[in-house]
Image (tube, rainbow, N blue to C red):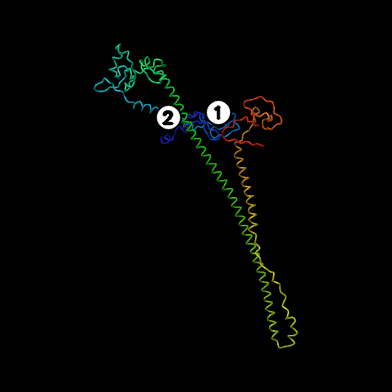
């Protein structure tokens, strides 16, 4: 428990509205904590229900719940702060140096009072004459202090009892009638009380400045957290878009390779058929060549003459002069590239449409109902009765000359004041 209490600091328990430690802390639906009275008064004053920290807008007044955990922590923090303050006060009292009696010769006893006339500090025993003797009773006594000579006027050697408001300095009685006779004076105690009150105000202002800066630190840290969340979301959306584009390109590449390979197989099949046909013709030509050679060596006159005509003509063959094997995939890359570009464009459009829809849905949570203020409209503008439409008229209307009305430009303001935070509204 002691280790945990050491980690607790005032920053953790500050209400961002009153800049003070929470009183009856409650939690809003967006997760931020405020004093119950502070957030209720804040919403009572404003036209809309806006979280003072993250600026989230609620269209109906949110239901507030007591944060029991924060409440218990604040209670413990207050107790620890009081104990610490009490301990610090005791330590200061203990640490405050004692003023010794100037009269004691051996053991210096603690002084009870200091005399501004005698410029001497007295213990209880040596103070007795100042309390009993009529001549000494008139001396000015005060709580014991050191360096009594610093409380005397260096010019007149008299106690500094007055404050010159004109010169803003401490003076003695003689100063008031000699050097400062036309000036305004007040007793030291009176000026002390005034200056003490001013210091109190200064201290409050400084504490407010400190708390405002602590709040600004919280706000900046919260902004960093929101920025980090937004960055992660943007990265995820970017990965989604480019993954889709990458997959589209890879599909197009695979289709291109498959198309080229299919056309190459078709070309190879065509070539194989041509080769088989040529080899068949070669086989038939070889057979005819063998028959012709055999007939040419025949000694039988009648046999040669009877078969000459059939052997003289070559067997029927195909004219291969114009036959070529052309790769059928030529131009495939160009056509595939053009198709891929179209597919990429379509894929990109679909992904961007998804992102735009998601972004629109995200910002619509900040939607506000804007109503135009006819009291600010330029006389040439026509504002509808419901304050939702405005048109430029042909005739300048004779309207009351309101200070807030636009006179030199055709403009109109909304009734709602949107000065900070996030707001979404549509204009047609």
Q: Answer few, some or many: residues within 10 Å of disc 1's Cα (few below 14, many 20 plus, some between 14 and 19).
A: some
Asked whether the residues under the numbered discs 1 and 2 touch, taking CB atoms below 8 Å apart as contact, a structural biologist would say no
Dot 1: element: helix
Q: Nearer the viewer, mark 1 or mark 2?
A: 1
**Quadrant of the frame with the N terminus:** top left
User: Is residue 59 shown left or right of residue 8?
Assistant: right
Of the pair 73 and 42, the residue shown nearer to us:
42
Q: Residue furthest top?
A: 134
* Residue 385 image-quadrant placement: top right
Q: Residue furthest left?
A: 106
In the rendered view, would you say 241 is above or below 320? Answer: above
Residue at 54 percent of width and 29 percent of height: 39
Q: How many marks?
A: 2
Residue 83 percent across, percent down from the top left: 40, 28
Residue 193 percent across, percent down from the top left: 42, 20
Say whether disc 1 or disc 2 marks the residue closer to the N-terminus: 1
The residue to which callout 2 is attached is 81
Dot 2: element: helix
Q: Answer few, some or many: residues within 10 Å of disc 2's Cα (few below 14, many 20 plus, some between 14 and 19).
A: some
Residue at 31 percent of width and 16 percent of height: 117
* Residue 106 image-quadrant placement: top left
Q: CA distance from mark 1 to mark 2?
A: 28 Å
The residue to which callout 1 is attached is 42
Of the pair 175 and 236, the residue shown nearer to us:
175
In the rendered view, would you say 314 is above or below 387? Answer: below
**Quadrant of the frame with the C terminus:** top right
In the rendered view, would you say 320 is above or below 34? Answer: below
Residue 4 percent across, percent down from the top left: 43, 36
Residue 420 percent across, percent down from the top left: 56, 33
Of the pair 153 and 85, the residue shown nearer to us:
153
């Amino acid at each position: 428990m002691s280790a945990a209490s050491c980690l607790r600091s005032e920053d953790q328990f500050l209400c961002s509205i009153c800049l003070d430690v929470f009183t009856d802390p409650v939690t809003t639906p967006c997760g931020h904590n405020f004093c119950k009275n502070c957030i209720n008064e804040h919403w009572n004053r404003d036209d809309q229900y806006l979280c003072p920290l993250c600026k989230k807008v609620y269209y109906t007044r949110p239901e507030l719940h007591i944060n029991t955990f924060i409440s218990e922590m604040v209670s413990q923090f207050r107790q620890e702060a009081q104990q610490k303050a009490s301990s610090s006060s005791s330590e200061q009292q203990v640490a405050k140096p004692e003023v010794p009696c100037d009269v004691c010769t051996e053991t210096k006893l603690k002084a009870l009072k200091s005399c501004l006339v005698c410029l001497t500090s007295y213990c209880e025993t040596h103070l007795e004459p100042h309390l009993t003797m009529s001549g000494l009773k008139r001396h000015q006594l005060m709580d014991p202090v050191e360096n009594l000579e610093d409380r005397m006027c260096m010019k007149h050697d008299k106690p500094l009892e007055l404050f010159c408001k004109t010169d803003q300095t401490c003076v003695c009685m003689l100063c008031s009638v000699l050097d400062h006779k036309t000036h305004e004076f007040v007793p030291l105690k009176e000026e002390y009380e005034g200056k003490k009150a001013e210091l109190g105000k200064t201290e409050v202002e400084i504490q407010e400045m400190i708390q405002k800066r602590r709040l600004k630190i919280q706000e900046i840290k919260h902004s960093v957290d929101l920025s980090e969340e937004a960055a992660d979301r943007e990265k995820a959306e970017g990965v989604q878009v480019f993954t889709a584009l990458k997959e589209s390109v890879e599909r197009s590449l695979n289709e291109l390779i498959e198309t080229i390979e299919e056309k190459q197989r078709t070309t190879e099949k065509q070539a194989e058929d041509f080769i088989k046909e040529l080899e068949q013709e070669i086989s038939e030509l070889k057979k005819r060549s063998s028959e012709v050679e055999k007939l040419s060596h025949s000694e039988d006159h009648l046999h040669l003459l009877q078969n000459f005509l059939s052997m003289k003509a070559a067997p029927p063959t195909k004219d291969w002069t114009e036959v070529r094997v052309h790769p059928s995939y030529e131009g495939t890359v160009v056509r595939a590239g053009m198709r891929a570009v179209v597919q990429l464009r379509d894929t990109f459009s679909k992904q961007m449409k998804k992102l735009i829809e998601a972004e629109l849905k995200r910002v619509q949570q900040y939607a506000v109902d804007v109503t135009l203020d006819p009291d600010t409209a330029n006389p040439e503008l026509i504002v509808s009765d419901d304050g939702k439409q405005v048109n430029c008229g042909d005739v300048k209307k004779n309207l009351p000359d309101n200070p807030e009305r636009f006179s030199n430009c055709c403009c109109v303001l909304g009734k709602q004041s949107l000065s900070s935070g996030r707001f979404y509204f549509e204009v047609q």
